[in-house]
Image: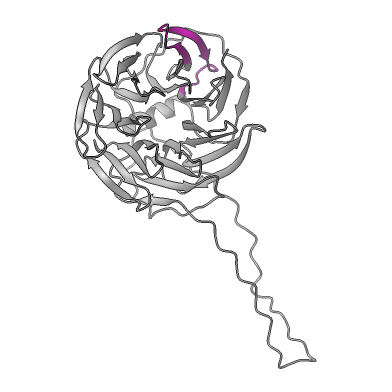
Amino acid sequence: MTPSRLFARLAAIGLFGLVPSIVAFVDTPTKPAQVISGHTDPVYGLAYTADGKKLVSGAFDKTIRVWDLSTGKESAKLEGHTDLVLSVAISPDGKKILSGSLDKSVRLWDFPGAVAVVPAPAPAAPAAKPAEVKKEAAKPAEPAKKDASKKEEPKKAEPAAAKPAAPAAPAPPPGPAVLAGSGGQVYSVVFFPDGQRAASGAADKAVRIWDLAKKTPLKAVEKAAENTIYSVAVSPKGDLIATGGDDKLVKFFQPADGKELRKAAGHTAAVYTVAFSPDGLKLASGSVDKTVRIWTVADAKEVAKFSGHPDDIYSINFSKDGTKLASAGYAGNVLIWDIAGSKEKMRIKLPPSTQAYTVAFAPDGKRVAVGASDSKIYLFDIP
């Protein structure tokens, strides 16, 4: 997908409201430690397993894939979404994958899972949008079919003998559970620490808290934002939900009743991404205004502002020890920030004309994975 086609696609779905003006501060691409290829469209969601040995990705090709990082090879491919996959998460026990999509569904998968194609009924095709071109997800080859015209002849010596019963066909692998009532296009999904609940944010302005056993919402905060909610995060204790959206605000909600507790104002454009620090005391947010801001959770006060990106910030992620923050931007820059010193620690540049859409720290904090517009996943070592 060329940058012009990608821009048209994102503009058509309302993923960003401002036209980026790309200014590359770093011209020389950074050499990656590893490059993973396999997706056929941009990679928009990433999550590491707790042991750091595998990586889960979601992409515009409508698939979720699991990668073995020791080999860089795909170990599983999950199909079922009927539109772009925008967010993926791994349950705390590592047994489930959660995904959110432009097809307005939240789906729960077994991890790692074999290929399981069990799509929900496809909605009526919308009218074609100007300059919109989409690739169809690659379909697995059909298994060879047995020739039904050839019949097994009975043995002449035993004309009355019954034919041996054909062995039972193996049961198909289980498909994903489609959570009922997901509302609008789903931009963000996240598990609660207990692994029994999840939260999602969508284009219908709502935050939903899910009972994963029942596959239904426990609570829906219907007007959590003035417009689209692009990002949701759950605190390490599970006692808070944070959101970022088109209204330029970071908001904090109480999961039990959906009550808005406080909000952080300061960004001057849409907030695309939010993340709690591992100790739960701070929250980071990234915005179309090209800044990353750090807020105290207790009172929603801004304590740091990082201005280093030349363009929209799409994704942020704390290292497990909370000392570093990674941020990924449209211009193809990934910045690593020193939280204690409130300064830039490292700058990574993707290849020319390649946008960075999502970033994830490895559990040991020594590497970051970046999902990119060229359908690849880049891994970089962090000193």
Residue at x-position 25% and y-position 26%: 251
Q: Which residues are magenta?
A: 334-356
The answer to which image quadrant residue 4 occupies is top left
Residue 20 at x, y percent in the picture: 36, 17
The outermost residue toward the right is 157
In the image, 11: left or right of 321?
A: left
In the image, 71: left or right of 315?
A: right
Asked if 139 appears above or below 234 in the picture, the reply is below
Residue 115 at x, y percent in the picture: 55, 50
Which of 48/152 is in front?
48
Which of 118/355 is in front?
118
In the image, 170: left or right of 123?
A: right
Residue 83 at x, y percent in the picture: 41, 42
- Counting every numbered tag in the picture gives 0
Asked if 84 appears above or below 288 in the picture, the reply is below
The answer to which image quadrant residue 205 occupies is top left
